[in-house]
Amino acid sequence: MRTLKYVILGLLMKKPMTGYDITKEFNSGVVEFWSAKHSQIYPELKRLTKEGLITFETVISGEVMEKKLYSITEEGIQDFKQWLILDPEVEPFQKDLFRLKMYFSESMNKSDVINLIKCQIDLHKRKRERLLETFKNYSFVPKPGSQEFSDYIVVKGAIMREDYYIDWLELCKNSYLDE
Amino acid sequence: MRTLKYVILGLLMKKPMTGYDITKEFNSGVVEFWSAKHSQIYPELKRLTKEGLITFETVISGEVMEKKLYSITEEGIQDFKQWLILDPEVEPFQKDLFRLKMYFSESMNKSDVINLIKCQIDLHKRKRERLLETFKNYSFVPKPGSQEFSDYIVVKGAIMREDYYIDWLELCKNSYLDE
DNA sequence: ACCAACATGTAAGAAGTTACATGATTTA
DNA sequence: TAAATCATGTAACTTCTTACATGTTGGT
């Protein structure tokens, strides 16, 4: 499916970036719904350059250090835009390790299950806090179609996801505690 | 991380199964949070057998057809139980192709975005209906710690997930329509 | 007789992770 | 001057998907 290809093209649609920038985007940015390591990104950037979908400009940082600042080409833009509207009906299958463990929870001691659930609740509450921190920056809903709206709606979705997940975890926990 | 290994061990904890059964479990069962093709499952079953974590018994179906009915060994049970309680703090990163597309929505025509969102809403509403069909079978909450509870809580979580996702999609759609 | 479902495997390749490898720049 | 971060790459390996390959069984 070459999803990484399209993620990179999409990021370069927003602005020119280096491989390092793209890597950071995955590790600390708003992009919490896809990931890739630099070892996957650099070869893909090479490939996309060879395919003519992106180009780079060498920029000097400091005295000698060369950065490759990549931009999307017209051909890349066309390819990317086609991908966006393609296959709108694909079933979004998602792996979920914790749900998997809950499916096997009958093999655990009750105290272990409860401990596991509590750990997850902590994790998701912390994640929710981090997202709310970002969300606070929006004093109004950006205009749909703008780059700000894309950011906004994705962060909003992430918070809603954490809310639902925490609700489910609390339900799991209470089922065990109420017993 | 050998997650497939543990998924298989977990399924065999529930009951003995053939490779075919395990494949079906991923394609049509309650297990909507992990997946694997038979081409990955059969080699893994071989490997687990060699590792002594599972064994099989050859069963004849009909006249000649041989099935391999796999069971988990004591060693497998110990390994599996350790895995369950290991690393309770792992961040559950999840890829989400549609959220990715929404993050890039500024590159689409508004009508294309709306069309894409409507498609997703349909998809998730249908999935929700299918899950509710399964959920109807529970007239009461099974006892925590039982196999039935594991099934129940996972289906419940899946429905909650669809609910949140549909809410988010409606929010996306309405942002574009209200404009 | 035919077809859907049962049943098991291998091969080739794509996607993703971990480890190896190197060097420059900035900030404390 | 040491450490953190910036910056780019390759190699080996695991994981996952698609395609190839074969044969049986049960229902109509």
Image (cartoon, coloured by chain):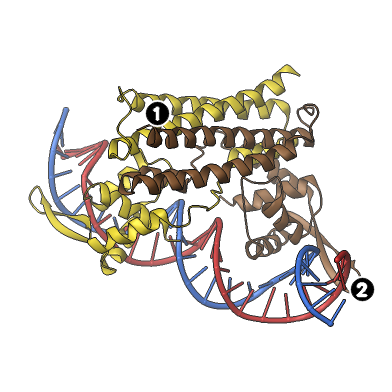
Chain colours: A brown, B yellow, C red, D blue
Compared to B6, does B94 lie above or below?
A: above
Q: Residue furthest right?
A: A63
Residue in the picture at 35% in, 44% down: A110
| Crowding near the residue tagged with mark 2, few <14, some 14–19, many ≥20 C-alpha atoms within 10 Å | few
The location of residue B127, given as percent across then percent down, is 44, 29
> Looking at the image, can residue B29 be seen?
no
Q: Which residue is mark 1?
A: B131
Q: Which quarter of the rendered picture does the C terminus of chain B lie within? A: top right
> Looking at the image, can residue B177 be seen?
yes
Q: CA distance from mark 2 to mark 1?
A: 61 Å
Identify the disc placed on residue A62. none
Viewer-proximal residue among B52 and A175:
A175
User: What SS does tag 1 mark?
Assistant: helix
Residue in the picture at 34% in, 39% down: B150
Identify the disc placed on residue A63. 2
Quadrant in the picture for residue B96: top right
The location of residue A11, given as percent across then percent down, is 73, 48
Quadrant in the picture for residue A64: bottom right
Amino acid type at mark 2: Glu
Judging from the image, mark 1 belongs to the subunit labelled B
Judging from the image, mark 2 belongs to the subunit labelled A
Q: Is residue B174 left or right of residue B75?
A: right
User: What SS does tag 2 mark?
Assistant: loop
Q: Residue furthest left?
A: B63
Label 2 and label 1 in one chain: no
Viewer-proximal residue among A87 and A43:
A43
Viewer-proximal residue among B160 and B24:
B160
